[in-house]
Amino acid sequence: AIYAPHQEVGDFVVVVNALVEKLSGQNLVGYLRPRLFEPLGFSPDVWCVERPEGGDWGGSGLVCSAADLAKFGLFLLNRGNWQGKQIIPEWYMKEACSPLIDTRVSVGSPEFSFGYGYQVWMTRYGFCTNGMGSQHAFCFPEKDLILVTTADTQAVPSGSDLILDYFWEDIYSRLSEEKIPENKNGFSKLNKKLTTLEFPLPEGETYSPLAEKINGKTWVLDENSMKIKKLQFSFFEDEVVMNYTNASGDHELRFGIGKYVSGLFPETHYFGRQIGKALGRGYRCKASGSWFNTASLSVYVYLVDDYLGTLKMNFSFNDDHITLIMSKTAEWFLEEYSGTASGKILP
């Protein structure tokens, strides 16, 4: 997904989006498909989140694949030229990808303080599209190179800067002007590494003797802002089932210990294709937990659907009492999973 990095920019693009739809009589994707997406070879599955009143949310909701984003990056790198055809005038593309606005004071990120063009951000060695959560197409004209990242670093301060710091040090600084010889062994290792990549596990232990004592116990919580009334943990060999009740009903969340478990997050009222309209199913997610110490259990839940977000939970146990802290990083959802609560075992 491609998202606008700042609310002001997003609002401006939504207005432009609405004007295009008003004048053309088409939604944004319908207008762009024959004029840009099809000439660039985008997948036919590209789509856009819809505004509450209808029409595409062009400032923050265009959903496409990493390969599609790479093609758009190459299109920017070549200043609007695609396979010898100038789709958008070169003069305009040069202007769009130039530092027209000073961002040194208004932007806190070091890497994006080099200026701003027409929805294009300048970087240390080039320019890029800047999407929320590190969804980028970086263009480096001097090296004839693009870098595409699809991620969700909303919960990581300056996540895009961290990615680029590693890129500058490990790849960009080592680029050669000469063609390097084929390395089949290295290519094989790279492919193997890519196929085994996984979210980092929460640091901690995979076992606590307390698990046996609290297995199947029910905690009743005091009144809290999250409106969680009660919860229960059922421990299995390397998985845990957490049952709980909140304002939307009874729910079950399964998470791994020392591994991730994939499933659907147990809330069905979050937005789907249209903002304000419930999807009717839970977002796809991956969840894992670990013991920080024998009496403290942490759980990380990564929502990896069309909408991206992170939920982190900590449960501290003290005799028959429990204290829980929940923190979320997501736009428009997980609102009821942010806060603190405490309670005690049901007699």
Image: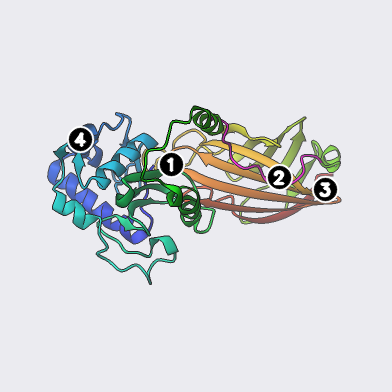
Residue 223 appears in the rendering: no
Q: Distance between the residues labelled 2 and 4?
A: 60 Å
Chain part drawn in magenta = 195-207
Given the image, on which type of amino acid does mark 2 rest?
Lys
Percent x, y of residue 45: 33, 30
Closest to the observer, 24 or 290? 290
Task: Verify whether residue 305 appears in magenta.
Answer: no
Q: How is the image coloured?
A: rainbow
Given the image, on which type of amino acid does mark 1 rest?
Phe
Disc 4 versus disc 1: nearer the observer: 4
Task: Verify whether residue 196 appears in magenta.
Answer: yes
Q: Residue 294 carries which label?
A: 3
Closest to the observer, 39 or 341? 39
Residue that appears at 43% across and 41% down: 271
Q: In this view, does 79 lie to the left or right of 109?
A: left
Disc 3 versus disc 1: nearer the observer: 3
- Mark 2 surroundings within 10 Å by alpha-carbon count, few (fewer than 14), some (14 through 19), many (20 or more): many
Residue on which disc 2 sits: 230
Disc 1 versus disc 2: nearer the observer: 1
Q: In this view, does 191 lie to the left or right of 237?
A: left
Q: Which mark is residue 271?
A: 1
Q: Distance between the residues labelled 3 and 1?
A: 38 Å
Q: Which of marks 4 and 1 is nearer the N terminus?
A: 4
